[in-house]
Amino acid sequence: MNFICTALVEICYNNEVGAVDPSIIPDNQMSASTKYNDSTQAAYGRLNDSRGDGWCARDATGTNDWLQVDFNRTVQVCGVATQGDNGGALSAWVKSFQLSFSSDGSNWTTYAYADNEQVSFDEVQVILCSLPP
């Protein structure tokens, strides 16, 4: 099964679990391995967030940085939307990522492409990746 990525797919987009809205998923439920500066902290890694420059790792070439959203409950995630720097000074965006999930915060399972197909992202366009069930 492949991830199916398209711009602004309506399928899951209208049934968000709340990561976009800080009143549903508070800032303290978002964390990251590193940040580039104070305007790129984990809580700013939300779609269309205007409080900062989105989340950005300290080292843009690193491969072990992560952004984590703790839903504080079990949820079925059927898609992930990503977005580049939303009008800020960094002009940066995700080129590739891995998606992992955990029910206890210690043991993680990583979603994997069956055929290693690469996902590409545009600068500020919102991209939604549907996940296999």
Image (cartoon, rainbow, N blue to C red):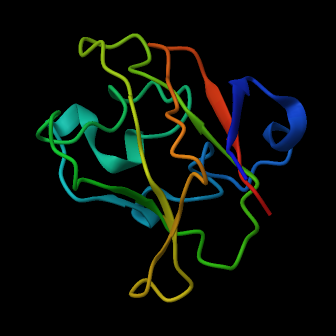
- Residue at 45 percent of width and 78 percent of height: 108
Q: Quadrant of the C terminus?
A: bottom right
Image x and y of residue 122, in percent: 49, 14
| Image vertical order of residue 127 relative to residue 77, above or below | above
Seen from this angle, which residue lies furthest front? Answer: 115
- Give the left or right position of residue 38, taking residue 70 as reference: left
> In percent of the image, x 43 and y 87: which residue is there?
107
Camera-side residue of 7 and 14: 7
Residue at horizontal 40%, vertical 10%?
A: 87
Q: Position of residue 75 (x, y in %)?
A: 73, 71
Vertical arrangement, residue 118 with respect to residue 106, above or below: above
Looking at the image, residue 7 sits to the left or right of residue 19; the answer is: right
Work out whether 42 lies above or below 103: above
> Where is residue 42 shown, x and y percent of the image?
34, 49
Residue in the picture at 55% in, 25% down: 48
Total number of numbered labels? 0
Image coordinates of residue 43 in percent, x first then y, are 40, 48
Left of 102 or right of it: where is 3? Answer: right
Q: Quadrant of residue 114?
A: bottom right
Q: Could you tell whether 102 is left or right of 67 in the image? A: right
